[in-house]
Image (tube, coloured by chain):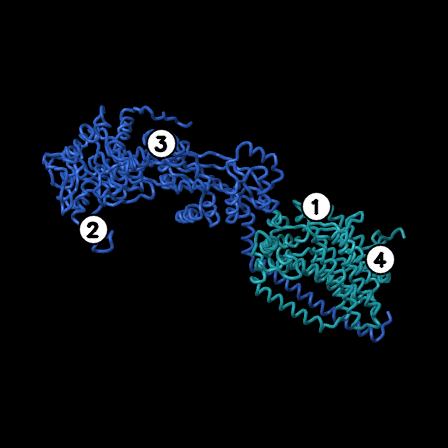
Amino acid sequence: MENRPLIKRLGFLWAGLDPSLSIILVGLVLVGNIIFLSASSGTVVTWVEQARNLLMALVIMWVTSRIPVKWLEKIAVWVYTIGIILLIAVALFGLIKKGARRWLNIGVVIQPSEIMKIAMPLMLAWYFQKREETMRFFDFIVAFIFLLLPTILIARQPDLGTAILVFAAGFYVILLAGFPIKFVLPIFIIGIIGIVLMIIFEDQICARNVSWPILKSYQQHRVCTLLDPFSDPLGKGFHTIQSMIAIGSGGFFGKGWKNGTQTHLDFIPEKHTDFIFAVYSEEFGLIGNTLLLILFLLLIQRGLQISAGAPNLFTRLLGGSITLIFFTYAFVNMAMVSGLLPVVGVPLPFISYGGTALTTLGLGVGLLMSIHRHRRLVQT
Amino acid sequence: MVGNSDSSSALEQFQQRIKIALWIVICCLLILFCRFFWLQVVQHKKYSTASESNRIAIITTPAPRGIITDRNGIVIAKNFPSFSLEVTQTGIVMPIPDLIQELDQVVKIPARDRQQFLRAIQNSKKTESIPIRNFLNDEEVARFLARRYAFPGVEIQVRYFREYPYQELGSHLLGYTGKVSVKDREKLAAEIEENPDEIQGDELRNMRVKGIQQVGKIGIEQSYEKQLRGTVGFSEVEITAGGRVVRNLSYTPSAPGSNLTLAVDIKAQFLIEQLYEKRRGAAVVIEVATGDIIAFVSLPTFNPNAFVDGIDADLWKKLNESLEKPLFNRPLKGTYPPGSTYKPFMALAALEGKYRTPSQAINDPGFFKYGGNIFRDDAKNGHGLVNMYTSIAASCDTYYYILARDMGVDAIHDFMKPFGFGQITGIDMQGEVKGILPSKEWKKNYFKDPKKGKWIEGETISIGIGQGYNSFSILQLAQATAILANRGVIMRPHLVKLIEDPLTHEKILTVPSESGVINLKKEHIDTVTEGMIGVNKIGTGSVPFAGVSYPVAGKTGTAQVYSLAGKTYNAAAISEFKRDHALYIGFVPADKPKYAMAIVVENAGFGATAAAPIVRQTFDYLILGKWPRGVPAWKTVP
């Protein structure tokens, strides 16, 4: 026993951690750290803080990966209920920062909408699992009510970005649970037609005196500047234009690590958080971007693979939804930074600085690994 | 892990949906890849340029404007440094209206400055430093500096402004500088476009124009704008989005503008302006041998310092609407009938054209009848027998009525033209007017209707005494007198004598040689000069020139502003602005002419009583250095 190499004696630490998922994550975290070292220059945050966040996420991931999936089924309703209670509490006594009521002070300041990103798929996956044998169309209506309740609460804070993500997380569950495509397809087509129309009639709908229903005026501005960022290059379009300049000027090979002028001369807003991808793109070019896209594709592919092999409906839905949420984060972030989508506060998973986001991600990956541990054995 | 058939079909459905999801994911990532390819490969050049122009800011260094001194080295236009409060948009942390409000608590920002600032930021880059308040005093500077931490992006800068230490003195000749207007900017850009020299790239050329903070608007400041301006220097610096300079990339120093030495003697200018005693008018003194303009008086004047930082609307309105027209450059743009000051030139024309001999006399009964009209002489009963000498000295109108009839308008025109009557003199100032030197040709062109445009012989008669269509500027009158005094040699009149390169100290004369010569017989000139000396000895100028110790030639004149239509002239009875203008021309010393002068005192009546005394005292100063009593002493501003 004494002769067993150390690495084998410590084997219990990573037993159950999916190797391919781990390798992809190491790759992403590595890229994230390299670019963080460049992006954080001139900001108040240090790499030590980012390392601390990563370590915390790692621990959460490790712990979560050990949780038996059965437990998750048991706590799903509770997590969701607590989340809803906290969201209501936010609406009543939340802290207001920058005009939005998103935070709650319970000794430490928390942002309950973050909890919903995990609680939402948990809850719906649990519900569909529960109704698996007796599924009717009515169940989808119930699911939508579960989905819309927190979504509306978050959207009213207002926090459209998180609301969309929470909605997406739940919606993925509903879709994967078998919600008829025929109901989705028309909405999808109408959406596309709508976007095309918006691009064509941009001048009219973005005229000064036009105000849109439902959306807040700042949200309207975001959409309008997306349609034409150069309509207000120094104001509303500034962020988008500057990040597009950063990406475009990076070219094929990039300007080299720590050589991004857009980054180091502070033209990129939020350069170590939401816009970190602009920094990466400027310094590593199209080659770096392609590498990152491949890493995300591998991550998602692996996540979906794990979900496909999950033991029951609950884990399948949970795994699939979590994976697709990773994808949504990555896609929305990169599309926003490159000027394809309006600016919403969505971080780039595993790359952007930020404790909360990393914690959620760690939790998500941990869940995936846990699902993988309890995978359905190959059918014989 | 027990599945029934239902759940296995559900599993199949799930796995199918997972497959679809994966394909959608791949499609989305492909869209992103295309987007990156578009930005980073297809449009790379565009964004690369954008990133460079983001990164590099061009900071201009203003060029010190050339100093203007008078002919004796007295500084009459200089630059003074002043503190300005300037805002860089990228550096500020609050909306501009709030910023102005907050700043106003510390340093007063008048409405006019606010408007100018708001207009300026519309046309500027975000990284440019735009003044929001100029001319801060020491207390204001201190007050701002104490609160500077509250105003990131706002800084105190030193800017240079034009200063005219003698205020209203000679304002029309100096002119003033002002802020660069949109029109000025276009003109400057076109000018710089013409001389591409070493400047590379639109950006730099643009900044060369933008770096010009002031531009000459009128007067010498305008006509010598190119020489005075200098070349804006600039440094290319790498900046952050906040406008903080990271490092210098290149530096081209500014080149100061050329210094100008005027032909003008500012002391003489001051004296003449004082001698007018608040009356309106114009006077020009020319050094005959050189064409140097010793004095260029236009009254009333204005304070050019009021224009330097943009004149305020009330003052502008007041100046613009005043009946006295203080902004009107009278010697350059005002035209007057020369009246009797025209007679010496008519006499010379008679001699040169052999219409008269000096001794040939005519009888003056006090009037001249022509074509049914009676042309009256000033002396009611006439001057009796009048030869050329008397005709000038006593200013006999009848003599010149007859002479004009004998010569005809075109002969008069042809003789007068080389003297510069009704012509552009070519003075180094913009906006000169031609006036009218009548001829048959002129009238035909002036009146489009051929009936109206036909010359009536009767019109020639009053031309002889400087009335009728005759209309000349005082500058032209002075120049003609100078040509006469200079015996036909034409020197282009000029306000600026020397242009000095501030670096090499090389000086260039603006008018190094004559521009033409009129062939005149010496004895003819002498005869006319004799007559003009007679004016001051025994004639119309004898009272103001009583006891003069140097030979002086002159001629009084009175120009009608208002047609009396047969009534007797009574100055008190008609409103001030309709009274006659008093004129005088002269040169001194008569035997060896050095200075020529022409002057008008508007609505002041007879030339002998209103204009001649000013000339007498000016000549006393120029020839004898005598400063008249009752005129405040000259004080050089240090």
Mark 1: few/some/many CA within 10 Å (<14, 14-19, 20+) = some
Q: Quadrant of residue B552?
A: top left
Which quadrant of the view contains residue B368? top left
Q: Is residue A380 visible?
A: no
Q: Secondary structure at mark 1?
A: loop
Chain letter, colour cyan: A
Rendered-image quadrant of the C terminus of chain A: bottom right
Pointers 4 and 3 within a single chain: no
Residue carrying label 3: B70
Q: Please report the residue visible at 16 percent of the width from the left and 47 percent of the height from the top.
A: B458
Can you tell which of label 2 and label 3 is closer to the viewer? 2
**Residue named by callout 2:** B441
Chain painted blue = B
Amino acid found under the numbered disc labelled 1: Val
Circle 2 or circle 1, nearest the eye? 2
Please name the residue that numbered disc 4 is placed on: A66
The percent coordinates of residue B137 (x first, y second) are 52, 33
Mark 1 vs mark 4, foreground winner is 1
Percent across and percent down for residue B587 are 23, 32
Q: Are marks 4 and 2 in contact (CB under 8 Å)?
A: no
- Label 1 sits on residue: A45
Lateral position of residue B74 relative to residue B133, left or right: left
Reading the chain from its start, which is encountered first: label 2 or label 3? 3
Q: Is residue A148 above or below residue B477?
A: below
Structural crowding at the residue carrying mark 4, measured as other residues with C-alpha within 10 Å and reported as few (<14), some (14–19) or many (≥20) = some
Please tell me which residue is depicted at 35% across the width and 32% down the height of the picture: B70
Q: Secondary structure at mark 2?
A: helix
**Residue drawn at point x = 28 percent, y = 42 percent:** B335
